[in-house]
Image: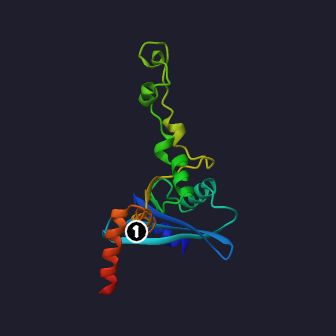
């Protein structure tokens, strides 16, 4: 099955993944799915890449390493353009620390930084810049690098409708409207 999924994704240029982790009966799991569009037929495709047991806590390092390993296992590491997760603090931190947009710093941004002495950034100052992008693009298997992160819209809406709505009940005006609307809904 893995070879079939890998073959199906080999001709695809861009892939999106979704990731979730959970605990059931004192055992932790991580699930990863891939989503892509067939370039020839423009059909949407999805595949379950992993549903693996995770030992230990769901820390941001453990999740980042597991996602990176699964992307590498299916040879899609360079094709994944975005990964969607819930808004769990462990996922948010994993993408904040290991996300690609946080690992790339250009010469221009280094020169524009307030912490950098501007004398070393001009031309003709005896400093020769070398193109290190070839070294940075090599995958040596040791560095964890995650794609762009997207929070799940359904999860966010659920939090708004449950947690935020309960917090809003401390406002008397909102509380009065809330009770009025829900009593009418209940009567229907």
Rendering quarter of residue 16: bottom left
Residue at image coords 44%, 62%:
167
Q: Is residue 17 left or right of residue 183?
A: right
* Residue 161 image offset from top left, x and y in percent: 40, 68
Q: Residues within 10 Å of mark 1 (few under 14, many from 20)?
A: few
* Residue 48 image offset from top left, x and y in percent: 51, 72
| Residue closest to the eye, 155 or 111 | 155
* Residue 111 image offset from top left, x and y in percent: 44, 25
Q: Label 1: state its secondary structure.
A: helix
| Residue closest to the eye, 13 or 153 | 153
For residue 144, above or below residue 151:
above
Q: Is residue 80 visible?
A: no
The residue where tag 1 is placed is 161
Residue at image coords 31%, 75%:
180
Residue at image coords 46%, 63%:
17
Q: Is residue 67 visible?
A: yes
For residue 89, above or below residue 1:
above
Q: Is residue 173 left or right of residue 126?
A: left
For residue 24, above or below residue 134:
below
């Amino acid at each position: 099955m893995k070879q079939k999924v890998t073959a199906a994704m080999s001709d695809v240029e861009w892939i999106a993944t979704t990731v979730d982790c959970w605990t059931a009966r004192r055992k932790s799991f991580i699930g990863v799915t891939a989503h892509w569009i067939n370039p020839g037929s423009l059909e949407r495709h999805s595949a379950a890449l992993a549903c693996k047991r995770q030992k230990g806590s769901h820390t941001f390092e453990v999740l980042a390493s597991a996602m990176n390993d699964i992307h590498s296992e299916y040879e899609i590491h360079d094709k994944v353009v975005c990964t969607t997760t819930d808004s769990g603090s462990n996922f948010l931190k994993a993408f904040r620390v290991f996300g690609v947009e946080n690992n790339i710093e250009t010469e221009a941004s280094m020169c524009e930084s307030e912490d950098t002495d501007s004398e070393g950034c001009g031309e003709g100052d005896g400093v020769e810049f070398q193109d290190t992008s070839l070294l940075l693009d090599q995958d040596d298997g040791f560095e964890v690098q995650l794609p762009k992160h997207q929070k799940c819209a359904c999860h966010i809406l659920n939090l708004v409708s449950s947690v935020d709505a309960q917090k809003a009940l401390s406002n008397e005006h909102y509380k009065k409207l809330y009770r009025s609307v829900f009593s009418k809904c209940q009567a229907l």
